[in-house]
Image (cartoon, helix red, strand yellow):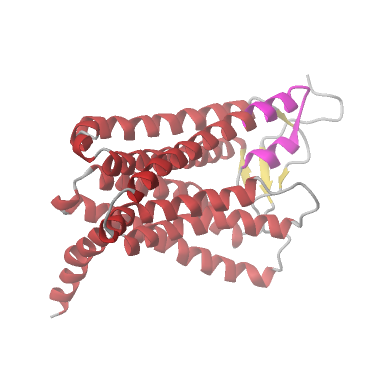
C-alpha cells in the first residue's frame, strides 16, 4: 500500500545533462556521436577480420570477437538514447524501457567483465602451459567459456533488474543520470525493503566484479612468474607482448570503473558525476578496439591485408 502522499511512477525524467549550459549540449552530441561511430566501426572491423582470416581462428581471437560483440551491444543499449536526449527538451523514459535499458547495460557490462577474465585465463594457459594449450583450450571448451560468460552476464542483468524494479517508485520521478542506473533509481524508491535491496544488489555486483578482477590478477601473477624464468630477453618480450593489449584494456576497464563506483562519498556536482560516468560509458568502449588494434601485431597485419589492401586495389 502506498501512503496518502505517494503516487506510483510510470515514467522517469533523465536529467543527467539538464544542468549543463544549453550551448554545450550540441558539442557533447557531436563528440559522443563520433566516438560512438568509431567504436562501432572499430569493433565491426575486428569481428570481420577475425571471421575472414583463417590465421586468426584461434581461441584468443574468438574471445576478442566475443568481446567486440558485447561492447557493440553495450553501447547500442545506452548511447543512442543518450544522444537523442542531448538534443531533446523532453527526456522521459517509460518504466518498461528503463527496465530494459538497465537489463541490457548490466548484461553486456558483466559479460564484458567475464570475457576479460576468460581472456586472462587463455593467456595464462598459453604462457604457463603451452604444451597443454590445444587440450585445455579446445574449440568446444572455448565455446563453453564464451557461452558461460554470456549466460553469467544475462543472470546478473536479470537479478539486478528484477531486484530494482520490484520496488515501488514514488514521486519525484527525476533520475539524476543520463541512463537508468541503480543508485539514482534507489533514491526514488520507497518502502521498508529499499535498504535491503540496495545492500543485496551492491554485494552481488561487487562480488562478481571483484571476483573477476582477482582471477585476472591471479592469472597474471602466474604469467609474470613464468615470463621471468625465460632466459632470453627476446623470449620474455615476445611472451609479454601476447598479453599486453589485454592487460591494458583490463587496466582501463577497471580503472575507470573504480573511479566512478568507488569514489568517496561527499559533495559532488551533478555535472562532474555525469562527465565521470560518460568516461566509462563512452570512452572505455572507444579505447578498447584502438588498444587491441595497435598493440596486436597479428591483428594489425590481418586488418591491413583484409581491408586496407582491398581499398587500395579498388582505388587503383
Q: Is residue 106 magenta?
A: no
Identify which residue is drawn at 46% across, 49% down.
Answer: 250
How many tags in the picture?
Answer: 0
Is residue 158 in view?
yes
User: Can you say whether 220 is above or below 84 in the image?
Assistant: above
Please name the residue shown 34% across and 55% down the image: 43
The quadrant where residue 290 appears: bottom left
Residue 95 shown left or right of residue 52 in the figure: right
Query: Does residue 158 sit above or below 94 in this rendering?
Result: above
Residue 222: x and y in percent read 39, 40
Q: Quadrant of the N terminus?
A: top right
Residue 164 percent location from the top left of the image: 63, 30
Of residue 189 and residue 262, the one placed in the foreground of this image is: 262
Q: Which residues are magenta?
A: 181-201
Q: Residue 52: x, y in percent?
A: 17, 53
Q: Is residue 312 toward the left or the right of residue 74 in the image?
A: left
Of all residues, the one furthest to the front in this rendering is 231
Q: Decide if residue 86 is on the left or right side of residue 150.
A: right
Up/down of 246 relative to 151, above or below: below
Q: What residue lies at 40% left-to-right and 44% top-to-bottom? A: 70
Q: Residue at x 31, y 40 (%)?
A: 122
Q: Is residue 200 magenta?
A: yes
The answer to which quarter of the image holds residue 129 is top left
Query: Would residue 224 appear left or right of 165 to someone viewing this image?
Result: left
Amino acid at each position: 500500500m502506498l501512503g496518502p502522499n505517494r503516487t506510483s511512477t510510470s515514467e522517469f525524467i533523465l536529467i543527467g545533462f539538464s544542468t549543463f549550459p544549453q550551448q554545450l549540449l550540441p558539442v557533447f552530441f557531436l563528440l559522443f556521436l563520433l566516438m560512438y561511430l568509431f567504436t562501432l566501426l572499430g569493433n565491426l572491423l575486428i569481428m570481420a577480420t577475425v571471421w575472414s582470416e583463417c590465421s586468426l581462428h584461434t581461441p584468443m581471437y574468438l574471445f576478442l570477437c566475443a568481446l567486440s560483440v558485447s561492447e557493440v551491444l553495450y553501447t547500442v543499449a545506452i548511447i543512442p538514447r543518450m544522444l537523442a536526449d542531448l538534443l531533446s527538451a523532453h527526456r522521459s523514459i517509460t518504466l518498461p524501457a528503463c527496465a530494459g535499458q538497465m537489463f541490457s547495460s548490466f548484461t553486456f557490462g558483466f559479460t564484458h567483465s567475464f570475457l576479460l577474465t576468460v581472456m586472462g585465463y587463455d593467456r595464462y594457459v598459453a604462457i604457463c602451459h603451452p604444451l597443454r594449450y590445444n587440450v585445455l583450450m579446445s574449440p568446444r571448451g572455448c565455446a563453453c567459456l564464451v557461452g558461460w560468460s554470456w549466460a553469467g552476464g544475462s543472470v546478473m542483468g536479470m537479478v539486478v533488474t528484477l531486484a530494482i524494479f520490484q520496488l515501488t517508485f514514488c514521486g519525484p520521478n527525476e533520475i539524476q543520470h543520463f541512463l537508468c542506473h541503480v543508485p539514482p533509481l534507489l533514491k526514488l524508491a520507497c518502502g521498508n525493503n529499499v535498504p535491503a535491496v540496495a545492500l543485496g544488489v551492491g554485494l552481488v555486483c561487487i562480488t562478481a566484479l571483484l571476483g573477476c578482477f582477482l582471477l585476472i590478477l591471479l592469472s597474471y601473477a602466474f604469467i609474470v612468474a613464468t615470463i621471468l624464468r625465460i632466459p632470453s630477453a627476446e623470449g620474455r618480450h615476445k611472451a609479454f607482448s601476447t598479453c599486453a593489449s589485454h592487460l591494458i584494456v583490463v587496466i582501463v576497464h577497471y580503472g575507470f570503473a573504480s573511479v566512478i563506483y568507488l569514489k568517496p562519498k561527499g559533495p559532488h556536482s551533478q555535472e562532474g558525476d555525469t562527465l565521470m560516468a560518460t568516461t566509462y560509458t563512452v570512452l572505455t568502449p572507444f579505447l578498447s578496439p584502438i588498444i587491441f588494434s595497435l598493440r596486436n601485431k597479428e591483428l594489425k597485419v590481418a586488418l591491413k591485408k583484409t581491408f586496407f589492401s582491398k581499398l587500395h586495389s579498388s582505388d587503383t
